[in-house]
Image: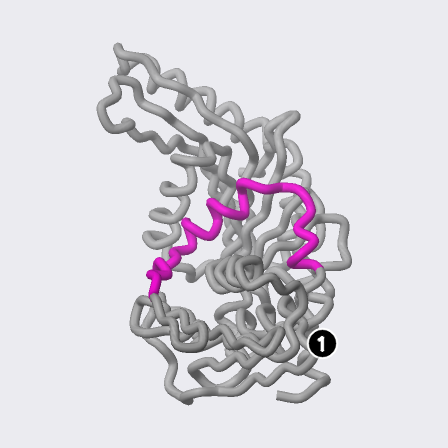
Amino acid sequence: MEVDAGRLLKELDENWRQLGKGEGSGVLRACAMTLIVLVREGADAQELGVTLADIMHEHPNRTIVLRVGEVGEVVARANLQCWMPFGGRQQICCEQIEISASLETLGAVPPVLFGLMVADLPVAVWCPDLELADLPELRPVLKLASKVMVDSSATLDIREALPALQRLSTESWRLADLAWARATRWRETVAQLACTEGWSKADEAEITWAGEGIPPAAAYVGAWINPGRLVMKCDTPEMPAAGVGRIKSVCVTAKGRQVCLRREGTGVAIEIERLRTGMVFPLLTDAALLHEELGVFGQDSQYERALAGVQGVLDAGV
């Protein structure tokens, strides 16, 4: 059966009608945006489902999951995702459409997606696979969005991811990288300390990390600090536990004083000369990072400057 937006919208209408029949207390239909999710055919459906369900609670949306395989015709189905808020009596429901296509049949997908966009609401694309996001065949899909979110964290070395990030950053949409969001707590803490210490430009900075290769988050932080002299080095070749970031320490020197942030387990120790304190950096899930990114559709000038500065960090030598 040929896939078209009209048929899928009729399926959604029928789902709403059937749900309304069985819910005497009523159902709240919620939608604040269209979210297109691009994944490979073999992606973990359960893990993805948990993430999308979490996102819907804070950012209710019409979710369109596009699974890209090697072969196969375009197939699609529509359903509803509902939950009951704690202490509530009324279900909140969002719409979800799943489409499967191969690289050869992707050309038929953008017109269908265009017909499924919720009118007058923003459109975002989340593609956790950077290599997939960079495929030329997917450019027409990405062009439907005002914001495209990728994740270079799975790339062991920023030098492998940078060409794709640079290409994606030159298009009409706003590009966001969850690797940048993963470094938010480091950047916020450094910025707060800079304000407390009364300096706006660092003379020197040293960033260390775990695992071979230059992690994108560390390169972003180095470019963001943009000190007079930057030292970046691997502290240990062993990768950290799942969910724990690769950055091990960030030390900044300005006006003759040094401030250091050092990871200690799930916490971070802050050292300013002889003073020492600590704080906890939460383990960030994809859902938590997406909550941050979906809350802002405008320009992220700090990220844009950091991405533009990464090549300078690499040219300076690591």
Q: Is the C terminus in the top left, top right, bottom left or bottom right quadrant?
A: bottom right
Q: Is residue 295 magenta?
A: yes
Question: Which residue is rendered at x = 53% and y = 79% of the image?
Answer: 207
Residue 300: x and y, percent? Answer: 66, 51
Residue 79: x and y, percent? Answer: 41, 33
Q: Is residue 257 visible?
A: yes
Where on the picture, by quarter, is residue 27?
Answer: top left
Question: Which residue is rendered at x = 69% and y = 47% of the image?
Answer: 299
Q: Residue furthest top?
A: 24
Question: Which residue is rendered at x = 65% and y = 26% of the image?
Answer: 120
Compared to residue 234, the image places residue 113 above or below, namely above
Where on the picture, by quarter, is residue 87?
Answer: top left
Determine whether the residue tagged by mark 1 lies in a helix, strand or loop: helix
Residue 220: x and y, percent? Answer: 60, 69
Residues rendered magenta in the picture: 278-304
Nearer to me, 181 or 286: 181
Q: Is residue 49 magenta?
A: no
Compared to residue 37, the image places residue 128 above or below, namely below
Residue 172: x and y, percent? Answer: 76, 49
Nearer to me, 258 or 191: 258
Q: Mark 1 highlights which residue?
A: 311
User: With 232 as the anchor, is 81 left or right in this view?
Assistant: left
Nearer to me, 110 or 245: 245
User: With 120 as the anchor, is 248 left or right in this view?
Assistant: left
Compared to residue 33, the image places residue 23 above or below, namely above
Q: Amino acid at mark 1?
A: Gln
Label 1 neighbourhood size at 10 Å, few (<14), some (14-19), many (20+)?
some
Q: Is residue 70 visible?
A: no
